[in-house]
Amino acid sequence: SQQGEEDPQALSIQEGENATMNCSYKTSINNLQWYRQNSGRGLVHLILIRSNEREKHSGRLRVTLDTSKKSSSLLITASRAADTASYFCAPETGRRALTFGSGTRLQVQP
Amino acid sequence: KAGVTQTPRYLIKTRGQQVTLSCSPISGHRSVSWYQQTPGQGLQFLFEYFSETQRNKGNFPGRFSGRQFSNSRSEMNVSTLELGDSALYLCASTLPSADTQYFGPGTRLTVL
């Protein structure tokens, strides 16, 4: 397993704006997963993108994966106050041991 | 379908004591993983159990142990608690052939 590193560490936007956060990792992966965590609570799975996929959509979420650059991005469109949370990426190499970075703390101002 | 449940949700212990945390996976999920989350170290993988066997282990001391029962429920035990063990302990379950891990709400352990 390996650690994903999210960037930026913190992001503050207005409701209705788009939010983009990035993730970099170090070695080859089978897939990369994005999770959301509301303050001090459990993680909610958002989306999984496999190493042979370049882009994936789920509702207002769009995830891209560039395996040549070992990076991924998560775009949340038309953000809402309820999107305020920490977002984590988790590169997965097939051993089921997800290792997370410190996350991006997103604050959406109403 | 019910999600992953963890009990208790909150726990306060003193140094030197031991603690057992419980995790019930989503029905049909046979893999259970445990994670520790602290402000300083972030989310770290503890171990994974599948079919009552530990399949994967993170870099934690032997004071941290776990087990899984035939109904896939899992317990995690921490002996000789230290102040640094104060954390949110999360468990996650997965279908045998899938990759997505579904997390429970966590148990917040405070060691005084």
Image (cartoon, helix red, strand yellow):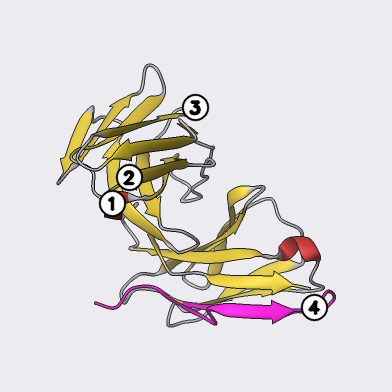
Kindly identify which numbered label has been placed on residue A81. Answer: 1
Q: Residue at x 83, y 74 (%)?
A: B15
Chain designation of label 2: A
Chain designation of label 4: B
Q: Using residue B85 as the reference point, say whether residue B4 is left or right of it.
A: left
Chain designation of label 3: A
Same-chain status of marks 2 and 3: yes
Q: Are marks 2 and 1 in contact (CB under 8 Å)?
A: yes
Q: Three-letter amino acid code at disc 2?
A: Val
Q: Position of residue B16 (x, y in %)?
A: 85, 76
As measured in the structure, the alpha-carbon distance from the residue carrying label 2 to the one carrying label 3 is 32 Å
Q: Nearer the viewer, mark 3 or mark 1?
A: 1
Q: Callout 1 environment at 10 Å: few (<14), some (14 to 19), or many (20+)?
A: some
As measured in the structure, the alpha-carbon distance from the residue carrying label 3 to the one carrying label 4 is 40 Å
Q: Are marks 1 and 4 in contact (CB under 8 Å)?
A: no
Q: Three-letter amino acid code at disc 1?
A: Ala
Q: In the figure, A57 relative to B10: above or below?
A: above
Say whether disc 2 or disc 3 marks the residue closer to the N-terminus: 3
Q: Nearer the viewer, mark 2 or mark 3?
A: 2
Q: In the figure, B58 relative to A90: above or below?
A: below
Q: Are marks 3 and 4 in contact (CB under 8 Å)?
A: no
Q: Three-letter amino acid code at disc 4?
A: Thr
Q: Which residues are magenta?
A: B1-23
